[in-house]
Image: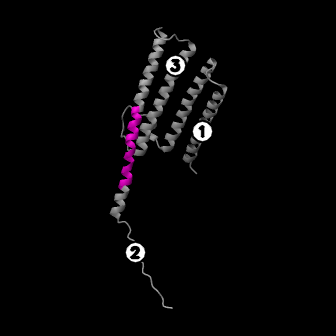
Amino acid sequence: MPETTTTTTPQASPTPRQRSTIGMAIFASRWLQAPLYFGLIVAQAVYVWQFLKELWHLVEGAFGHGEALNESSTMLLVLGLVDVVMISNLLIMVIIGGYETFVSRINLADHPDQPEWLSHVNANVLKTKLAMSIVGISSIHLLRTFIESDSGRISPETMLWQTLIHLTFVVSALALALIDKMSQTKH
């Protein structure tokens, strides 16, 4: 039986220039996230508007120009304001921290208003801060639910589910913080 020889042609591998071009294109794709952060800035503006509307309702009620406020309704309006501020803080962390971590440096060196947390932000720190903020927001919503429960508009089943969801957020935030701490521990 005659022996057959097969010849294989060497596969052309990308040249260093091609690899560099591909790598640069992939690296440049991070800028696709920039419009997302600008969209969150628009959402931030919506929350500022929401805050001003709720603040106006509080002031109107306090001076008797709108619906009269009792202690419970005043507390609910104030909790609404705190909720809007906490969500706004969450947006700022995502906008600034996400842009700094995933898109480009902001270069605020020696700027007097640079947030302290920005100097050591990374994906893990950002996730932990976001999780803690979500716990805080969930706490405000749960407190509002318990205050409104006297009115009879909220069922015990709804309160139970909101409590369980809140506890899930707490456990998740603690787990993220623990994972972050373990990743920073020297072996």
Distance of label 3 from label 2 (alpha carbons): 73 Å
Q: Which of 155 and 31 lies nearest the eye of the viewer?
A: 155
Q: Which of 155 and 30 lies nearest the eye of the viewer?
A: 155
Q: Residue furthest bottom?
A: 1
- Disc nearer the start of the sequence (3/2): 2
Q: Position of residue 138 (x, y in %)?
A: 56, 30
Vertical side of 128 occupied by 87: above or below:
above
Mark 3 neighbour density, 10 Å: few (under 14) some (14–19) many (20 or more): some
Distance of label 3 from label 1 (alpha carbons): 30 Å
Q: Position of residue 143 (x, y in %)?
A: 59, 24
The residue that label 1 is drawn on is 174
Q: Position of residue 92 (x, y in %)?
A: 44, 34
Is 175 contained in the magenta span?
no
Identify the secondary structure beneath mark 3. Answer: helix
Residue at image x 64%, y 25%?
155
The residue that label 3 is drawn on is 77
Q: Which of 6 and 108 lies nearest the eye of the viewer?
A: 6
**Badge count:** 3
Vertical side of 127 occupied by 10: above or below:
below
Residue at image x 63%, y 30%?
163
Q: Which residues are magenta?
A: 24-42
The quadrant holding residue 36 is top left
Residue 21 placement, left or right of 52: left
Vertical side of 179 occupied by 8: above or below:
below
The residue that label 2 is drawn on is 10
Q: Position of residue 116 (x, y in %)?
A: 44, 35
